Structures are given as structure tokens and as C-alpha cells.
């Protein structure tokens, strides 16, 4: 009976460990199988260490612009080893924290590579990574419910496969031995533009290459264009409607052939190339095909409660499909745990999932873009408010930014909110709550926002949508 569980979760990332803790809170016996990093990619090689790097980039940016604040800062420079050391230390702290939380909630950590051999049965093979203290060994385990939370890995393009030396994924980009003098970045999603911001601040000559017509393809066009202008003002070069068709490796450089939509071609040489063209779910070697678990385009197919087509098998997080975000994985972990425990779990509404990109400037959004709202047939009212009209933003030295809100003209329903500027990733949750509470424009207009705060830009954007803005 020792190896028998109510819930066995494969993967200890944000979805896996949160789901495990919630299931344990509900009185279920829970085990988590992990093969590499307690906490998964997010705290170890993703969200958290990346934000630590970006904080260093932000600090050096402010030091270099100290004169703008009436200050004098001399002998500035970058100690990349120190920057990476800080980031890796924070990653270790977060990973250890996840291990502590699992232990506190009496969740077993089983160390190894899991394969589902039959419904309710999991075979765990030994991992090459050292096991944390107290982890259970490889062996045969059984569970009434198996939750797949194996996450995703960087997508590799044929002929441009990462080699860890000249062509990097986010793994290598998070822990460079030195700062490349020049850098090409394929892809302008969140990962691509965050590394563009970091390496530009560290002193690299950065070029972004994006296949689609706009950078940050999932964002509202107006917000993406604002961000692009800010990036280019910083000196980041951007090629849109372009693709890397060929890469030739030198001794310590890469030369990329870049083709544009108009049929033209050019070659670009740089010290390193970061491949940031998306991720693909880790669905291999789990036994899914043998069990008949349905997959689609590299992800496990699930319903609103994270159930697969095979009873007793669930999937959450990146492996269960987009949007591939840690907070989406965490929420799905809770949904699955509560559904397994027989509680009244609420299905995920993906329109309510905010997206945050921590580049400089930051970008955050929730709900429909203006284009998507129109395509859905809504008659809309759109509000905009620039940071230059906000006293706190100007006092911070951050006057460049924009808040955009989109309402259903007939009902006043908030359909979407899109922000670009300083600390907008901290502001977006206000709009997320508003959408979850089905707040109308009238309630937002009548809410009192504190002064002086950057959050007042949110209020003014709503006012602007209805012709009532004060400070513009």
C-alpha cells in the first residue's frame, strides 16, 4: 500500500506542485514524480531566474541614466558572473522552497522518469540527476488518478538546432559565461523580447527576427507597435515578416541567411543566436499512445476540468496546451485536484488568463484585442490613456506607456485590457479581477483610484472610452 496513491502527478512544475498541494489539502494521498528539477522549469530555468536577470538589467539602465534623476553615478559596468550567480541563487532558493512546501503538505517526491504502463500504474526509472534528500526511489507505483504535468521544452527548427555553444535556447541564455558582443534572436514572443531587453542592457548589439508582421504576435497591434518603437529607440534592431532560412556556424560566431516577405535576402553575422520560436509539450515516452490518450500538435487534449479522454488520466499546464503560462498551469492544478476530490471545480476560462512580458517596457494584457473583438462581431468602445498624462509615471521618469481598454458598446462589458509601460505587469490584475467579477464600465468609472499612482492610468483609460477622460 505504500506505493499506492489517490493522486500521482508526473512533473513538479507550477502545475504539478500546486495541484499536489491542493490535493493534499483536500485529504488525498499524493505523490509527485520528478526527473530533473524540483519546481520544474519556472523557478529553475524560466520565469524566476529570467526575472532576476531582468532586474539586474533594469538596475544598470537606471544607473546609466542617473543624470536624468539629478544623480551622479561613475564607473558603471557589468559583472556578468555576478549577475548570473545572483539569478542562479534565487532559482535555487525557489526550488528549495517548493521542496519545503511539498514536504510540509506530506506530498511524496518520487525521483525518476515516469511511464504510464496501464491505467492506474506508473513505472518510474532511475534519473541521471541526483535525487533530493528524502525522495522515494525508482520503482512501480499505482494511483487512482494520474495527472500529467510534464511541461514543455524549447522548439527546435530543422537545420537550426541549438548546440549549447553558438545557438542557444533559454537554458544557455540564462547562464552565459560572457556577454556576446552581438546577438541574433529568432522569435519575438515573450522569451525573445525579454532576452533582447536583458542583453541590450548588458551591452550586446541585438537583432530580433520575427516571421509574423508584428512583434509580440499575441498582443494588441497598437500595444505591440508602441513596444517596438521603444525597443528600436533603445537600439534593438527588429526585422518582421522575416525568417532565418539557413545558419552557418563559424569558430565563434554564426551567420544567418534571413529572407523577407518581399523575397529579398540578407546575411547577418553575430556571436550567438538565441532560438525563441516557441515550445512543444513533453508528451514523449509517457506511454500515452499505448493507452489511447488523445494528443494534438504536441499537447494532450483535455476538457475544461483537465480530464483526458481516458478515465483516471488528467493533464495540466504547458503539456495540456496554450496559453503556456505558469499561472495557467497553477490554476489548472487546482482545478484538477478539486475535480478529483469531487468538489465543484470551475472550468478554466482562457479569456480571463492574463499575459505578462517583462521586457523594457513591460507588456501586459487580458481578454480580447481590438482586432479580435471586432472579428467576434462586437460593437466596441475603446479607451486609451498615455503615461505622459499621469503624475506618478512622470515623477518616476517613466512617461512612455499606454493603457488601452475595450468595452462592449451595448452592455458595457469589459472585453479586454492591454498595457505597455513601467510595472504594467503589476497593474493588469486589476482588470483581470474586473473581468472575473463581470464589472461594467459604470462600476469602473465610479471606483476611486488612489493618487498619485500609475493605476490612475487604468481609470482614465476607462473614462476615455466613454468620452469622460480628465487628464488628456
Image (cartoon, rainbow, N blue to C red):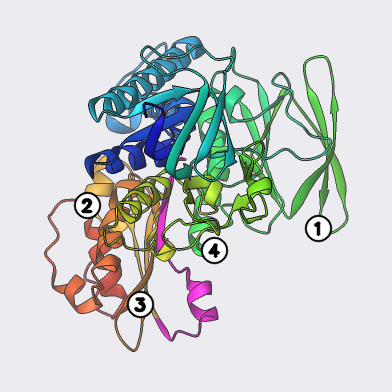
Q: Does the magenta stretch include residue 171?
A: no
Disc 4 designates what residue? Answer: 221
Mark 4 → mark 3, Cα distance in angstroms:
17 Å
Residue reaching furthest to the bottom: 410
> In the image, is residue 242 above or below residue 386?
above
Q: In the image, is residue 375 part of the stretch drawn in magenta?
A: yes
Badge 1 or badge 3: first in the primary sequence: 1
Q: Mark 1 points at which residue?
A: 261
Q: Answer whether labels 2 and 4 touch (C-beta < 8 Å).
A: no
Q: Is residue 245 left or right of residue 334?
A: right
Query: Is tag 4's residue or tag 3's residue first in the polypeptide sequence?
Result: 4
Instruction: Tell which of 246 and 269 is nearer to you.
Output: 246
Front label number (1 vs 2): 1
C-alpha gap between disc 4 and disc 1: 19 Å
Number of numbered discs present?
4
- Along the polypeptide, which appears first: circle 4 or circle 1? 4
Report whether 134 appears left or right of 360.
Answer: left
| Category of crowding for the residue at label 1, using alpha-carbon neighbours closer than 10 angstroms: few (below 14), some (14–19), many (at least 20) | few
Q: Which of marks 2 and 4 is nearer the N terminus?
A: 4
User: What whole-number distance in Å separates the C-alpha atoms at marks 1 and 3?
Assistant: 35 Å
Tell me if label 1 and label 3 are in contact, CB under 8 Å: no
Disc nearest the viewer among 2 and 4: 4
Task: Give how far apart the Cα atoms at labels 1 and 2 are.
Answer: 43 Å
Q: In which quarter of the image is residue 160?
A: top right
Relative vertical location of residue 264 with respect to residue 359 in this rendering, above or below? below
In the image, the segment drawn in magenta is 355-380
Residue at 57 percent across and 47 percent down: it is 189
- Which residue was labeled with disc 3? 407
Give the quarter of the figure containing the C terminus: bottom left
Q: Cβ–Cβ below 8 Å for labels 4 and 3?
A: no
Amino acid at each position: 500500500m505504500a506505493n499506492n496513491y489517490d493522486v500521482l502527478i508526473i512533473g513538479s512544475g507550477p502545475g504539478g506542485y500546486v495541484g499536489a498541494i491542493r490535493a493534499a489539502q483536500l485529504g488525498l494521498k499524493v505523490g509527485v514524480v520528478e526527473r530533473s528539477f524540483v519546481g520544474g522549469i519556472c523557478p529553475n530555468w524560466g520565469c524566476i531566474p529570467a526575472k532576476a536577470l531582468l532586474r539586474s538589467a533594469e538596475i544598470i539602465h537606471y544607473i546609466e541614466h542617473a543624470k536624468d534623476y539629478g544623480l551622479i553615478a561613475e564607473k558603471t559596468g557589468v559583472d556578468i558572473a555576478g549577475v548570473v550567480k545572483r539569478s542562479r541563487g534565487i532559482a535555487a532558493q525557489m526550488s528549495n522552497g517548493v521542496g519545503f512546501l511539498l514536504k510540509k503538505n506530506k506530498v511524496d517526491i518520487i525521483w525518476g522518469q515516469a511511464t504510464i504502463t496501464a491505467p492506474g500504474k506508473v513505472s518510474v526509472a532511475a534519473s541521471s540527476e541526483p535525487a533530493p534528500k528524502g525522495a522515494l526511489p525508482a520503482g512501480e507505483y499505482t494511483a487512482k488518478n494520474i495527472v500529467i504535468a510534464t511541461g514543455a521544452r524549447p522548439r527546435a527548427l530543422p537545420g537550426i538546432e541549438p548546440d549549447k555553444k553558438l545557438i542557444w535556447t533559454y537554458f544557455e541564455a540564462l547562464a552565459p559565461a560572457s556577454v556576446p558582443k552581438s546577438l541574433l534572436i529568432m522569435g519575438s514572443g515573450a522569451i525573445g523580447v525579454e532576452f533582447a531587453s536583458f542583453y541590450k542592457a548588458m551591452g550586446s548589439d541585438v537583432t530580433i527576427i520575427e516571421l509574423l508582421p508584428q512583434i509580440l504576435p499575441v498582443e494588441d497591434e497598437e500595444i505591440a507597435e508602441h513596444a517596438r518603437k521603444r525597443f528600436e529607440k533603445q537600439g534593438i534592431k527588429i526585422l518582421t515578416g522575416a525568417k532565418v532560412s539557413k545558419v552557418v556556424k563559424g569558430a565563434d560566431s554564426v551567420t544567418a541567411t534571413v529572407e523577407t516577405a518581399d523575397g529579398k535576402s540578407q546575411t547577418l553575422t553575430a556571436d550567438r543566436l538565441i532560438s525563441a520560436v516557441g515550445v512543444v509539450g513533453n508528451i514523449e515516452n509517457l506511454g500515452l499512445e499505448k493507452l489511447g490518450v488523445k494528443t494534438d500538435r504536441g499537447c494532450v487534449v483535455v476538457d475544461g476540468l483537465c480530464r483526458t479522454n481516458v478515465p483516471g488520466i488528467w493533464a495540466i499546464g504547458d503539456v495540456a496546451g496554450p496559453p503556456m503560462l505558469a499561472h495557467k498551469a497553477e490554476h489548472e492544478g487546482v482545478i484538477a485536484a478539486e475535480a478529483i476530490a469531487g468538489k465543484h471545480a470551475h472550468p478554466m476560462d482562457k479569456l480571463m488568463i492574463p499575459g505578462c512580458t517583462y521586457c523594457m517596457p513591460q507588456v501586459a494584457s487580458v481578454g480580447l484585442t481590438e482586432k479580435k473583438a471586432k472579428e467576434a462581431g462586437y460593437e466596441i468602445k475603446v479607451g486609451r490613456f498615455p503615461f505622459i498624462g499621469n503624475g506618478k509615471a512622470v515623477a518616476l521618469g517613466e512617461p512612455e506607456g499606454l493603457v488601452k481598454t475595450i468595452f462592449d458598446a451595448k452592455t458595457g462589458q469589459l472585453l479586454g485590457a492591454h498595457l505597455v509601460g513601467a510595472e504594467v505587469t503589476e497593474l493588469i490584475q486589476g482588470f483581470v479581477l474586473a473581468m472575473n467579477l463581470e464589472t461594467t464600465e459604470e462600476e469602473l468609472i465610479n471606483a476611486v483610484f488612489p493618487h498619485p499612482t500609475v493605476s490612475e492610468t487604468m481609470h482614465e483609460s476607462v473614462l476615455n472610452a466613454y468620452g469622460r477622460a480628465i487628464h488628456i
